[in-house]
Amino acid sequence: MARGRLRIYLGAAPGVGKTYAMLKEGQRLRSQGTDVVIGLFEPHGRRPTMALAEGLETVPRRSLTYRGSDFTEMDLDAVLARLPQVALVDELAHTNVPGSRNAKRWQDVEELLAAGVDVVSTLNVQHLESVNDVVEQITGIRQQETLPDEVARRADQIELVDLPPEVVRRRLAHGDIYPPDRIETALTHYFRVGNLTALRELALLWLADRVEEGLQRYRAEHGIAAPWETRERILVGLTGGPEGETLIRRAARITAKTPGSELLAVHVVPSDGLADADPAALAEQRTLVEALGGSYHQTTGEDTVEALLQFAQAENVTQIVLGASRRGRLRSLLRAGVGKRTIDGSGPIDVHIVTHEEAAGAATPLVRPPHPTRGTGPRRYWSAMAATVLLLPALTAVLVALRGHLGLAIDLVLYMLAIVVIALVGGLYPALIAAVAAGMLTDYYFTPPVHSLDIERLNDVVALVVFIVTATLVGTAAGTAARRTYQALRATTEARALSRLATAMMHGQNLPTLLELVREYFGLTAVSLLERDRANGPRPRWYVVASAGERPAERPYEADVESPVTDDLTLAARGRPLSADDQRVLAACAAQLGLAHVHGRLARRAAETDNRAAAERTRTSLLMTAGRDLRSPLHSAQTALARLREPGASAAERDQLLDSALSAVHRAVQLVADLDRLGRLHAGALDLYLRPVDLDEVLAAALDDLGPGRHTILLQLPERTPDVIADAAALTRTLTALSADALRHSPEGRPPTLTAEVLPDRLLIQVTDGIADNTPPASAPDARSDSLALRLARDLTEAMGGTLEPATSGPAFSVTLIFPTSAHRCE
């Protein structure tokens, strides 16, 4: 059965119209005769959205009970049994209720796609895993429901549902997104214009990257090498030399002049490792590139210019920035420099040659001339064979022309020199072939009888034998030395690659970054780490743990090169074929990546366990504190209500008892509300909006929140107090809780005191009980320090960036709060 197609409506924030667009698409498909059902959609009380769902068949939801509460989720089995052509499934990143078939809704969608059902779904950009930390920086809220980017990338179509921030806020104010009781909070917190603008830009950029991936895939499938200037991409070539910073800054200025352009930097590492640059210099230049908003890359190639141009074509580069040649005139005459060769081969790509202080100096060049002791390989072997075929006949022709002027000894020495050169280039076997050929040429042309392979003189026979033996020994020694040099260089390069990977692991780099290092080192197109899930029926499924590059393999059989780590973990690569030595190094890298994956999983599990243990300890402590604090008001209410049942009580006594019971119940309700606030605060669900707050307004609101009755609190405030940086509602609740707690523990006739003191850039607020030195405290200081009111005040204060310190002075108990003040203080 063919796999279904996934279509996602992507939005920057709730309320932009994703669900509406999904239902509208469903109605369009239905009008064309397509079998469409609603697997699940969330109307959130929006009447236009609910009206658009009319006429579409809806699969009933499945009911689940979790911790005593009833929930509904999409009935996956019912949708699979119905097997429509298209299923509409809202909120792709949603986390299913425990007890569901899958933990995440996108996993339900994967099963529908595998069954051949096309799915239309919705997604907010803040739920993508890769941008979760950025969204937290923007909004101050960390999203708990996230979706792996790879799931969204695999979608066959992604459509952006976009609205300007002002329109979204207007829809929110009109009640089209949230109910009335949530509008004010949403407008001043998550739905601020700055937040919506940043999230909108994030969605546009993420989608632009996906469009870019599609474009690159299309160009690769159709063999299009010429760059398409959809946007400017400026590539700067780095050698690791001192001119690197000059080139980077010049390329950055070019990038800045073109809005929407992209800066890339690349360093070509020779495949033999002989011309590697200073790692420290490259590290500094990489830091500079990333600080200027660019990206740093490394690629491997035998020829620097060829590797540079291949990278530029693969990345659709439009301009290349290179430094002026550091080669002298003589060397430039012998071989063209990198800049000249890049210009000749760049085609439609513009090349900028930037002058610098190191131009034409003695610094290390970008490309070194061939070294005579480089390791042998296919190219060098056939070069040596070609030299044998061409050099020996040419040398023989010269010696024949000089036959009357040179003796046999000189002829043999010259042949020996040619054989040594061939041995240094190609190793043992070309040297042996050249020695035999030179011996036969010497016998045929220079030993009597000439033009015959017969030898008349014994001296000539001995000389010829010694020549062949000597040539064989020299060729063997030269070939062995070249092979040892190649092996040493290869080992150095492998050690450097593994060391670089290990260093990145020690620095805590994530798996995609490590995979990118492996991809760049081997010059591959894409690399992915795959894990097999054996628990999913008789046919195990493979999942992409992490990937790097374009179109990474999602199954082992889709890869060009596979390096298994364990039975259930493998490294799959796409790109050029690798030699046996490269595959051996890739296997070592795969083992390190597998170790990093296992360590990361163990670290995540340990962190989750620690978080759950800490949350459980906090929850237990809160429940114990709440139970202790609730005992007193509930006992007071129970006593007052019991006395009300006694006959003979006057009307005044009954009113007093009712007031006492009402006050106790009010206090118990307030304690439960405080417990709820603490739970939401610890769960990260309590939004705080920090801004300059007037203390006088907050105190007035706190006194009003104390409820009915006579509440006397002595206020000692300076004439002018600066605004404090806090959340107005949270600060009001903090002062209300502390004031109510102080009132309960202060004796009649001695009200508590609230004082404020202006400090440099801070404001100190102190709430003190009205207990005299000779008055015994109503409760022990330790119990007061662990009350629910104090815990709520402390957690709220610390969440707002302030500090809270309780203290005892004799029987009196005081609480000191310190908040930062705004920059514009009253003088």
Image: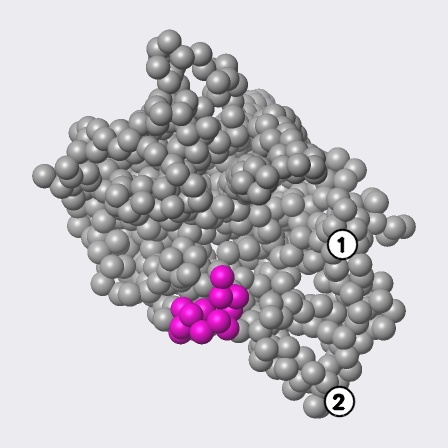
| Mark 2: secondary structure | loop
The three-letter amino acid code for the residue at tag 2 is Gly
**Which quadrant, please, contains the N terminus?**
bottom right
- The residue where tag 1 is placed is 70
Q: Is residue 773 visible?
A: yes
Q: Does the magenta stretch include residue 305?
A: no
**Image quadrant in which you'd find residue 755:** top left
Q: Give the range drawn in magenta.
A: 167-181
Q: What numbered label is drawn on residue 271? A: none
Residue 823 percent coordinates (x, y): 18, 42
Taking the spot 61% from the left edge, 25% from the top edge, the residue there is: 628
Asked if residue 360 lies left or right of residue 709, the reply is left
Residue 380 percent coordinates (x, y): 52, 42
Residue 334 in the image: above or below residue 281? below
Residue sitting at the far left: 827
Taking the spot 72% from the left edge, 85% from the top edge, the residue there is: 55
**Image quadrant in which you'd find residue 665:** top right
- The residue where tag 2 is placed is 33
Earlier sequence position, callout 2 versus callout 1: 2
**Which quadrant, please, contains the C terminus?**
top left
Asked if residue 762 lies left or right of residue 279, the reply is left
Q: Does the magenta stretch include residue 179?
A: yes
Asked if residue 195 lies left or right of residue 497, the reply is left
Q: Can residue 282 be seen in this view?
A: no
Residue sitting at the far right: 538
Please say if the residues under marks 2 and 1 sit with CB atoms less than 8 Å apart: no
Q: How crowded is mark 1: few (under 14 residues within 10 Å), some or many (20 or more)?
A: few
Residue 752 percent coordinates (x, y): 35, 27
Taking the spot 37% from the left edge, 42% from the top edge, the residue there is: 702
